[in-house]
Amino acid sequence: MASRLLAHEVADLCLGKPPLKSLSISATVRHALTVLKSTEDTHVSIWSCHHNNHLLDQQPLINNCLCIGKICMVDIICYLCKQDNIESPSSALDSPVSVLLSRDLAVVRHVDPSTSLVEAIDLIIKGAQNLVVPISSRTTINSKRRQIQQQQLSIAPTTHTGGIEFCWLTQEDIVRFLLSSIALFSPTAAYSVESLGIINTDILTVNYHSPALTALGDIITSLADQTSVAVIDDDGNLIGEISPFTLAYNDETAAAAITTLSAGDLMAYIDCGGPPEDIVRLVEARLKERNLKGMLDEFSVDYSSGIDPLVSCNSPTSFSSDDDEPLSLTTVKLGRFSRSSSYSARMTRRAEAIVCYPGSSLVAVMIQAIAHRVSYVWVIEEDCSVIGIVRFSGMLQVFRAHLESLMK
């Protein structure tokens, strides 16, 4: 069984993966916003076709097309929150989409379908978040339908040479694949995350009562690192989180919330992808107080329908007593508000911090992260004080070491 696992190539993990939503580097932030709000995907890939060779120093040229990055709604939200853009968000939306891209080209890596599983894990450990893999050309009705939809949105589709389409593999894809063969990693998978030394104590935190805008830099960092910002009280206890994974299910109006709300109120705003009406009114009032007319006009949204509070914001915090059971640190439980596009059809995750204890087993933490569609799990003590975070990248380092022993 070990030899079969080691024989797998990235093409095996790409079976059934949909082709990437592609956007040209010549597009604007507004174009990217339109694409993100019209698709169920949380990310869109940015491509340079007919590019300059100096962009290709670190990656192979594939049919004159190169994926140079990825963006999500959080990139746009954080961009609009920057000081230069708060006054005139409309002008910011007309900026080139390149302003949203990471300068680290290694975040997205092109790989050949024959790349081995071990090589793919090595790339992720070195910093890659998405592996771009070519898939067979599809001149199908679905491909034509995607082109028509892009034309209807007044967006120039990115056409790759030879009609080649691409998909990408994420850290979650690889961890999920390894979980299907977890028996091969016995007894390592049963060891605690503490004993394996994969608890990262270098974490990002913000006080519950602090202005959310003070955490903007940390939100940007957590997005780049695929982690989150812990919201803590004065005693260092974990109250909740401001997670890019949850924030990505909101729209651009969340920029106004970050600009005006406290960290605690922001958690309520982004929960389930829709804010309660009283917090929306608070955002509007504070925008008026600060005379941010541009942001108020650009993000004027009618939230009067679809708001359905489920539980009081004073819901008690609760934990499971079993270390190997999924744990959730419950914050606010709020409702959704309806949206007219397919953006509303996404299954959103509440603004709850997913937690474990130092003694939780590696496999239990893997299951928690995959079940909640995040790439990390917070580590807390019995008194709810946060001590660190366990990330997919750390888990993959453990599995890579185990695979190394199988290869000898």
Image: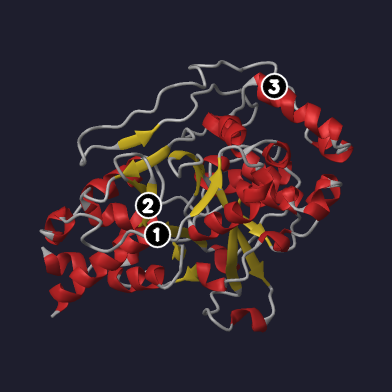
Q: Nearer the viewer, mark 3 or mark 1?
A: 1
Location of mark 3 (residue): 303
User: Relative to residue 387, is residue 49 depicted above or below?
Assistant: below
How far is disc 3 from disc 1 in space, using C-alphas?
39 Å
Q: Secondary structure at mark 3?
A: loop
Can residue 147 be seen at all in this image of the molecule?
A: yes
Q: Amino acid at mark 3?
A: Tyr
The disc placed on residue 201 is 1
Give the colour scheme shown. secondary structure
User: Relative to residue 292, is residue 221 depicted above or below?
Assistant: below
- In-front residue for pair 341/405: 405
Residue 82 pos. (x, y %): 75, 53
Determine the image quadrant of residue 211: top right
Q: Residues within 10 Å of mark 2 (few under 14, many from 20)?
A: some
- In-front residue for pair 195/6: 195
Looking at the image, do the residues carrying marks 2 and 1 touch, with CB atoms under 8 Å apart?
yes
Can residue 14 be seen at all in this image of the molecule?
A: no
Location of mark 2 (residue): 387
Which quarter of the image is occupied by the N terminus?
bottom left
Is tag 3's residue or tag 1's residue first in the polypeptide sequence?
A: 1
